[in-house]
Every structure is written in structure tokens, then in C-alpha cells.
Image (cartoon, grey):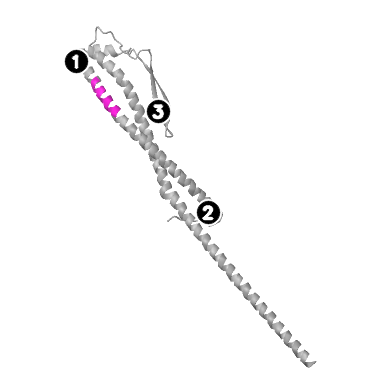
Amino acid sequence: MANITVTPTRMELTRLKGKLKTARRGHKLLKDKRDGLMKQFLETVREVRSLRTEVEEELMTVHKSFTVASALMSSEALEQALVYPKQSVELTMSSRNIMSVNVPVYHFQTKTKSDSDIYPYGFAATSGELDTAVDALGHVFQKMLKLAEIEKSAQLMAEEIEKTRRRVNALEYVVIPDTEETIRYITMKLDENDRATTTRLMKVKDMLLKEAIEDRREEDARAVKAFGASEEAHQEV
């Protein structure tokens, strides 16, 4: 039971009724937001799971190709071929709003116009497996960036869902019940005051009525006495 320390007045009752209406409306809006976020979060998690599987498979392919290339080429030749990268990438970030949650959107731009211009070596002195590995790594990089984007989105949505859930629970189990109980308490006190006031008014009315009856009796008694005195005087005459 809530610790009720409010003053039971009609003004306070009106204020609490407004507060209760606002809390119920906020509770509904937050529940709708939580449900919408949960739906979007589950879709994002499924996307993360699918994309992570693809990235892991492609990284395994890259690893196998590099392993074969390192077996076919000497370590010095492999290092010399990859020591000076030809392509560079500029990474920028923007954001988009999902159910009031700002999630990141990553963009990258290669230095040259062609995304395939990634081989920093001549083809004559290198293995074809190295070409396959570099090409596969260039493609998986884009998916890794997309994976980082949606994983961060899922993390931010999970945090927002947890905060929204706490707010919904606070309204549902604390604010709304306490406000309803306080309203019942004030209503009960006001009803008691009204009944007490009505009882006092009835008692006052009874007292006034009794006084009026007594006054009327006294007047009647005086009238009867005066009439009797008048009759006696008339008989004497």
C-alpha cells in the first residue's frame, strides 16, 4: 500500500485525475513503442544472424586462399606484394531514426572509382590464389561493415527496449496503482466529509425545528393565557 500523505481536497483530486489520465495515455504509448521496437529488433537480429553466417563463410574462404597462396609463394614475396596497399577507403557515418532510436549508417568511398582496383602488385610474380584472396577480402569487407552497422543498431534498440520496459513497468505497477489508490483515499475522505457535513446540517435543522416548535408552544400558551384572562374580565363586567 502506498504511503498517502496528500491533503484530501477537491483541487488535489482534480489534479490526480489529470495525472492518472496522462499516465494511462503514456503507458499505452510506451507499450506500443516497446512492441514496435521489439518487432524491429527481432527482424534486425535475424538479419545479423544471416549476415554473420555469410561473413564467417567468406572469411573462411579468404583464409583458405591466403593459406594456399602462402604455400605457393615465399613469405618474402607475399609480404612484398602486400606491403604497399593500392586502394584506400574513406569511411563516413550518418544516422537514421527507428522508433525514436538513432542508429548508425556507415558509408565508405574508395580512392579510385573502381572498387575492383585493389591489387597492389603485378600478376606475373604472384599466385592466382592471392588474387582470389584479395578479391574475396575486398568483397567481404563491405559485408563486415554492414554487419557492424546492424549489430550496433541491434545493441541500441536493445538498450532502448530495456529503458522503455522499465518505464512501462514503473507506470503499470507503481505510478498508476498509487495514483488510483490516492484518488480512492481522497474520494473516501471527501465522501466522509460530505456525510459529516450533511449530518451536522440535519442536526442544526432539528435544533432549529425544535426551537421553532418550542417558540410556537410558548406563543400558543401565551395566547391561551391571554384569552383566558380576557374571558374572566368579560364575565366580571
Whole-number angstrom distance, CA of label 2 to CA of label 1: 83 Å
Q: Quadrant of the image for the N terminus?
A: bottom left
Mark 3 vs 1, N-terminal side: 1
Mark 2 vs 3, N-terminal side: 2
Does 151 appear above or below 226?
A: above
Q: x, y (%) of residue 5? A: 50, 56
Disc 3 target residue: 104
Does 139 appear above or below 161?
A: above
Question: In the image, what residue type sits under mark 1?
Answer: Ala
User: Image point 71% across, 82% down: which residue?
Assistant: 223
- Quarter of the image for residue 164 reads top left
Q: Main secondary structure of the magenta part?
A: helix
Left or right: 191, with 167 as reference point: right
Whole-number angstrom distance, CA of label 2 to CA of label 3: 46 Å
Whole-number angstrom distance, CA of label 3 to CA of label 1: 40 Å
Q: Residue furthest right?
A: 237
- Residue 59 drawn in magenta: yes
Question: In the image, what residue type sits under mark 3?
Answer: Pro
Disc 2 target residue: 13
Question: In the image, what residue type sits under mark 2?
Answer: Leu
Disc 1 target residue: 71
Bounds of the magenta span?
50-61
Label 3 Cα neighbours within 10 Å, binned few <14 / some 14-19 / many ≥20: some
Q: Report the mark closest to the observer, 3 or 1.
A: 3
Give 165 or 34, whichever is nearer the viewer. 34
